[in-house]
Image (cartoon, helix red, strand yellow):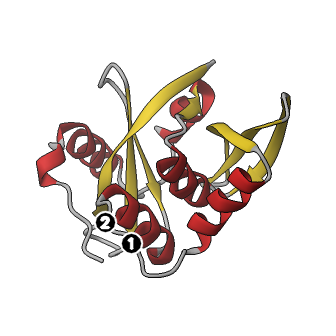
């Protein structure tokens, strides 16, 4: 089953200094952290903050190409989690035909914020993500999960 999620925000993992995109379900019951690279985090942050770069960035170019070809990003789907790696795809509408394109979740999210396409996560991924080895210590994992769930959007911030 697919669960619609929204981007709660971007933050930096205090232990690794890596950016994290936080997705939250519409019922505010589940939070899914996805660690991303700094370039992708900046691409997402720029769009969330409505900062227009002087020239199109890669994700802007991709959006422009889709528009010029008459294709529409219907939604992105984070469909799998294998060996601590998330897998996603773009669901495109190309002249009435549905086309699925493999994509990294960070790129898919960066494109979704530019096209206002919804983000969906397979419920199996949400269930699996609870067991992702964020820390070898179970108590640390539980503290991280409680911390992620308690975050307020005003507490979130990613500095470009």
Q: Are marks 1 and 2 in contact (CB under 8 Å)?
A: yes
- The quadrant of the image that shows the C terminus is bottom left
Residue 86 lies, in percent from the top left, at: 62, 51
Measuring 40% from the left and 36% from the top, which residue is drawn there? 6
How many other residues sit within 10 Å of disc 1, few (<14), some (14-19) or many (≥20)?
Answer: some
Task: In the rendered view, tell whether residue 78 sits above or below residue 56.
Answer: above
- Label 1 sits on residue: 18
Front residue of 2/123: it is 2
Front residue of 33/72: it is 72
Front residue of 160/14: it is 160
> Quick one: SS at disc 1?
loop
Give left or right: position of 122 versus 146: right
Measuring 54% from the left and 47% from the top, which residue is drawn there? 115
Residue 53 lies, in percent from the top left, at: 41, 76
> Quick one: SS at disc 2?
loop
How many other residues sit within 10 Å of disc 2, few (<14), some (14-19) or many (≥20)?
Answer: few
Measuring 59% from the left and 65% from the top, which residue is drawn there? 59
Residue 13's disc is 2
Q: Quadrant of residue 64?
A: bottom right
Task: In the rendered view, tell whether residue 157 sits above or below residue 4.
Answer: below
Residue 111 lies, in percent from the top left, at: 57, 54
Q: Pick whichever of labels 1 and 2 is earlier in the sequence.
A: 2
């Amino acid at each position: 089953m697919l669960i619609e999620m929204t981007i709660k925000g971007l933050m930096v993992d205090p232990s690794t200094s890596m950016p994290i995109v936080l997705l939250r379900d519409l019922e505010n019951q589940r939070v899914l952290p996805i660690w991303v690279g700094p370039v992708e985090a900046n691409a997402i942050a720029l769009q969330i903050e409505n900062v227009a770069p002087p020239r199109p960035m890669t994700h802007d170019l991709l959006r422009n190409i889709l528009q010029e070809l008459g294709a529409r990003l219907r939604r992105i789907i984070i469909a799998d989690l294998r060996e601590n790696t998330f897998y996603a795809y773009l669901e495109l509408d190309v002249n009435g035909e549905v086309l699925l394109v493999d994509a990294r979740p960070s790129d898919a999210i960066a494109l979704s914020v530019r096209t206002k396409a919804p983000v969906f996560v397979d419920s199996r991924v949400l269930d699996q993500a609870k067991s992702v080895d964020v820390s070898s210590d179970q108590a640390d994992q539980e503290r991280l999960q409680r911390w992620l769930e308690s975050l307020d959007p005003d507490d979130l911030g990613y500095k470009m």
